Image: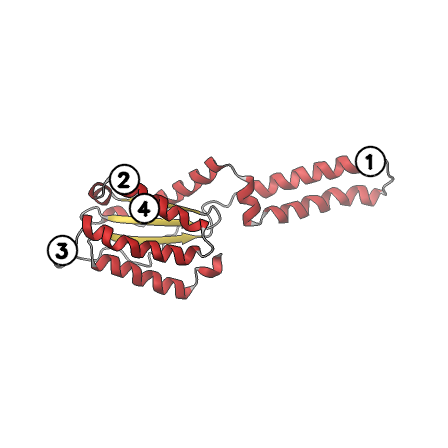
Amino acid sequence: MKRQFNQQFRTRLWQNIAAIERQSQVEVVVIIRDSSNAYHDIPMVWAIAAAFLSFSYVMFVPMLFTDLELYLMPIAASLLAWLFARMASVRRFSLSKARLNRSVEIMARALFQKGGLHHTQNKIGVLFYCSLLEKQVFILPDRGAEMALPAEEWAKIRADWQAIFLTEQPAESLLNELTRLIPVFNQYIPPVVDDLKELADDLEVDL
């Protein structure tokens, strides 16, 4: 999936954001990250479980093992399990939906604050945060943008954006969803003369 979000994609992304901002006052920022949390505990849990099961196997099966085998099998099992659990799909499978949701929301709100999206003059910054491991999108509009659009419009936008990870080409789907936002923001937050650009399209935020 990460290969889809390459430099060519980013160039098209910035073009789509520029198109939105030419036809509305809204300040759009899209941030894409590999994950919202390292989840270091997941590989460790898998490793401990594998070591326990391996040790139980060599202790109770009716077979003879050498001392070296008794020593090495739990170590090898735990190492293999630890490596296996570092795969994104395994970590995602091992986590509850609630924890995935919480991690994405915490990261999105931290990026919103640290990136200064709340500092726009008319409070019309909107963060679209995409987390690849969790396969989630969290949309965080500032107060002015949130109040400008009806609640049902925001609900539809969130549902449409969350669905990009249900497609085979999430990067392309993301660009398409940005294009669909042009008339929406144009209707509710129309452009004004001499509108100032207050946020960078390629905003990088270190946490």
Q: CA distance from mark 2 to mark 4?
A: 9 Å
Residue 152: which numbered mark, if any?
Answer: 2
Which badge, 2 or 4, comes first in the chain's sequence? 2
Crowding around mark 3 (Cα neighbors within 10 Å: few <14, some 14 to 19, many 20+) is: few
Closer to the observer: label 2 or label 1? 2
| Position of 95 relative to 22 (above/below) | above
Which badge, 3 or 4, comes first in the chain's sequence? 4
Q: Residue at x 24, y 42 (%)?
A: 146
Q: Inspect the image, locate mark 1, and give the three-letter code of the amino acid beneath it.
A: Val
Say if residue 112 shows up in the picture.
yes
Q: CA distance from mark 3 to mark 1?
A: 77 Å
Q: According to the image, label 1 marks what residue?
A: 61
In the rendering, at what x and y percent does residue 187 appear?
19, 50
Q: Inspect the image, locate mark 3, and give the three-letter code of the amino acid beneath it.
A: Val
Say if residue 40 shows up in the picture.
no
Q: Inspect the image, locate mark 4, and give the three-letter code of the amino acid beneath it.
A: Ile
Q: According to the image, label 4 marks what residue?
A: 157
Q: Inspect the image, locate mark 2, and give the three-letter code of the amino acid beneath it.
A: Glu
Q: According to the image, label 3 marks what residue?
A: 192
